[in-house]
Image (spheres, coloured by chain):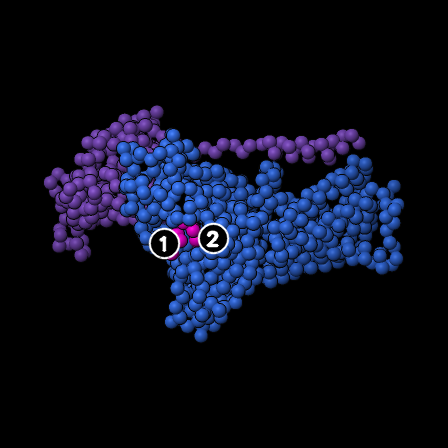
Chain colours: A purple, B blue
Amino acid sequence: MKFRALLVFVLPAVILVAAALYSAPQQVPQPHHLTKIDGSGKALSAWSGPWSCVCDDRTQLLWEVKTDDEGIHDGYWTYSWYQYEQGVANSGDCYFEKARCDTEDLIRHTNRQKLCGAENWRLPTTDELQSLVIADPIPGHPAVDTDYFPRTKRGDYWTSDGNQPLQGVYQYLKRGSRAINFINGDAVTIPYRNAAFVRLVADNSNACHKARQ
Amino acid sequence: MAKNKSFSWILLHGAAIATATLSLLTGLRIATLSSAPVAAIEELLPQGQVHSAHFFSAAILTLVAILYCSRHAGQLLCGRLPDFTRMHYQKAIIWLGSLVLLISLGSGWLLFSGWGQSAQLRTWHFTCALALGAYIFLHGGVYFVRSGRRALTRILLPAASPLARSFFVVALLSTIILFGWQALTARSPYQLLVAAMPLATPIHIDGIADEKAWTESTALAVNTDGGANFIDGQTRVSLRALHNGEEIYFHITWQDPTESLVHLPLKKTASGWQVQQQGFHHFDETRYYEDKFALLLSDSCTFGAAGTAHLGRKPLEGKPANWHGKGYHYSDTGQVHDLWHWKAVRTNDMYLADDNHIGAPYRVRPGSRRYTAGYLQDGKESGSYVMNWHWYKPGAVVPKRIPGSPDMLTPYRNLRSDADWVIPWFDYQPYSVEEDSYPPGTLMPSVIYSSNRFEGDRADVRARAQWQDGYWSMEMVRRLDTGSPLDIAIDSGVCLWVSAFDRAQVAHTRHTRAIRLALETTK
């Protein structure tokens, strides 16, 4: 009878007390192929910030992260495609140049700044930029991991693949550059003079090397 | 030795045990939303879509109670009155338990119906639920302690009973339960008549329902409770609706003693700017937050916000737990439900409600500390509000923007200021340490409008509210059919639920019965 009394009255009481004393386990981020990097090149944990770059463990590429501080990396700035004296200079919109902006302006400023410790910032190739496209974005949101790449616009981002033949209504302009449309991740060829967004990339970066260790 | 019980008795007794236990556990899970002591034992409680289970078990328990009462009423009518002076322990406990059960069922059905002051009723219901839990131990537990396995044999193994009669009893009760449940689910929604008006009739979305058309609509009042703040966590919501064949308009009022516009303000301290919060870090702020209101629209009228309310810290296997332990909204079937989320600071000056949706649980986003399962915002082309910090930390934050002149912060001298706690983007300048000479104690708003409004799918719902004399008054309008796959096309039969938030991030009020729209034929 004593055993049954223990079973019926004491055991439930012990369970209740144990449940009240129990603390849910601390939540931690899941492993991911993207790593946040701060402005000095130091890796941050997934739920830390602010960060200036992202390292992709799959490609070992270091990516620029856009801001909304009206500085060099503001996500609203647009650029015409211009590099190695090819393309159209100064046909985008930004605040950090006296004249209007082109892709070479952003590359020059970013390398001078040594963003995330890198000095070899450049435009990404089509394949490189397309490696950031995700197949299942939040409906109505850009096709990229916006938790790592905030302030990405649903628009065209330049690649380094210039000298491409233009088609359709742009055919009369003859040549343009490839861009990735972050609405759906498609590659498009648009005229150099277009004001499109830019996300720079750097390879062989110390930041990615350290983040992998 | 006592004889085994009859099959009918065992059936009713077993049903009473099972449904009382299920009702108790699911009810306690629902209570975790607003009761911290119950939330402390939430690990022991069932998770997920518990509302339907709670009502279904309560319906069966009610049937069992009616049958018991009928039997006892028959005995009383035959003159077999209980002798209270010579009643032994178990008889007394059973009478007390029956009384508790009746109060529990009565208060539960009154709560379900939405009648009366729901907070007081809920207190009665909750107290009786705890007493019912005690009854299970004092009745069943004491029987088991005294008699051991013999007690179980007696209530589980029936005395010989004709098979045909047993089958008849089971079939009859099953049929009553099945049809009763179907009738309950089909007939439980409130009906909101959406009055028709000519397409040319203008309604100004300003929160003041002074247009003549509103006077021709019928008001529906719904008691909601279980939220943070308010008066006892409850508020009565009044709804009117109109349509012109193209758009649907709502005028909604709800009681809120305080107009809460101070949304996570920034305060300068010796160590820098700090976000004022007491629960925001766990996504459950109930003090430094704006007032809000939400409408959920769905083609489904299922209990528990169209079946999207899944309670518990981790109701989704394989997905992260939620930080506040309340639960998630998501769709089990992949069906999309519409959610209009008006925010007193973040959207009211945009003349918008945030057009959101609830769908299937979204994939885990490793970079996001907060997982919201199926609750997501619709997409937008441009425009937004942003918070005035680069990265939130419970300690110090770096603001994105500060005013060019200290005078601009004069209206925010204290947290009771009824100033507009919104910063227009271009009125402030990018933050720099050199420009930040503000003394400790300085307050600054944290919501920045980077444009006048959203553009795109997220801006489908226009809304504006005004607070006066303890009430919010809000007007809303949306096209009946936006064509968006993330919106619900509105027609007769669509159900909606309403929730009010009094300076609370997630702790909203709620009601049980859906509100079914009935659109009047266009004039």
Q: Name the residue under label 2.
A: B293
Q: Name the residue under label 1.
A: B350
Q: In this view, does B53 lie to the left or right of A6?
A: left
Q: Nearer the viewer, residue B167 or A159?
A: A159
Determine the residue positioned at 30% across, 48% down.
A154
* Residue type (three-letter) at the residue carrying disc 1: Met
Residue B449 visible, this orientation:
yes
Q: In this view, does A112 lie to the left or right of B283?
A: left
Per the model, the C-alpha gap separating discs 1 and 2 is 15 Å
Determine the residue positioned at 48% across, 59% down.
B252
Check the residue under mark 2 and report the chain it is in. B
Residue B131 among magenta residues: no
User: Which residue is most to the bottom?
Assistant: B523
Q: Position of residue B345 (x, y in %)?
A: 40, 49
Q: Quadrant of the C terminus of chain B?
A: bottom left
Crowding around mark 2 (Cα neighbors within 10 Å: few <14, some 14 to 19, many 20+) is many
Determine the residue positioned at 60% across, 31% down.
A21
* Residue type (three-letter) at the residue carrying disc 2: Phe
Q: Which of A81 and B223 is in front in this view?
A: B223
User: Which residue is most to the left?
Assistant: A85
Q: Is residue B66 left or right of residue B480?
A: right
Q: Nearer the viewer, residue B158 or B43?
A: B43
Q: Where is residue B224 in the image (x, y as percent from the top left)?
A: 56, 54
Q: Where is residue A107 in the image (x, y as percent from the top left)?
A: 19, 36
- Residue segment shown in magenta: B337-351
